[in-house]
Amino acid sequence: MKTQKIFRILFWLLLGIILAISIMPAAEAPTVFAYDKLNHGLAFFTLSLMARLLWARTNAALLFVLLMVFGGGIELLQWSMGLGRDADWMDFAADIVAILLGILAGKLFWSIRGKNSVPE
């Protein structure tokens, strides 16, 4: 199996894991950091970096918008589900900052690697 295909599968798995953790009851949701915004940052930085590395030729603004919609959608789900979760605009802001940083890190990676190594 090509490495690119494996990383795409990992990206979609990560997306699903982030969604699953985000909509499970708050008391059961695993965390890495005690500060919630850092958990958002880690999740969305990793997701957006992977997206930028995988789809390097895709318009960065499009990736940003799609990932931002995903983050906003999670907040709306949390607000509507009533599982001890609530929509928090500061969580959404942390998602947006992390998405931007992840996309920029991916761009930096490809600029250091050189245009010839960017996947099709």
Image (tube, grey):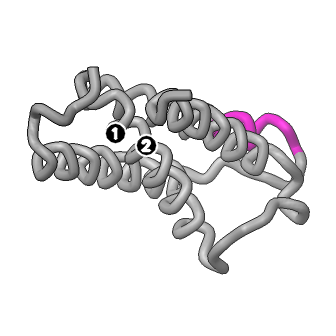
* Amino acid identity at mark 1: Leu
Residue 34, picture quadrant: bottom right
User: In the image, 92: left or right of 119?
Assistant: right
Residue bearing mark 1: 53
Q: Secondary structure at mark 1?
A: helix
The residue sitting at 23% across, 49% down in the picture is 104
As for residue 43 lying within the magenta part, the answer is: no
Say above or below: 82 vs 61.
below
Residue to which mark 2 is pinned: 50
The x, y position of residue 2, in whole percent, is 49, 29
Whether residue 103 sits left or right of residue 51 in the image: it is: left
Amino acid of disc 2:
Met
In front: 64, or 107? Answer: 107
| CA neighbours of label 2 inside 10 A, class few (<14), some (14 to 19), many (20+) | many
**Left or right, 39 with reference to 67:** right
What is the crowding at mark 1: few (fewer than 14 residues within 10 Å), some, or many (at least 20)? many
Where on the picture, by quarter, is residue 111? Answer: top left
State how far apart marks 2 and 1 are (Cα).
Answer: 5 Å
Query: Is 89 on the left or on the right of 75, as rendered?
Result: left
Quarter containing the C terminus: top left
How far across and down, in percent of the image, does residue 70 sit? 55, 32
Residue at 73% across, 48% down: 22
Q: What residue span does the magenta drawing correspond to?
A: 74-82
The answer to if 79 sits in the magenta stretch is yes
Residue 4 position, x and y percent, is 44, 31
Mark 2 vs 1: CB contact within 8 A: yes
Query: Magenta span: helix, strand or loop, mainly?
Result: helix
Closer to the camera in the image, 91 or 19: 19
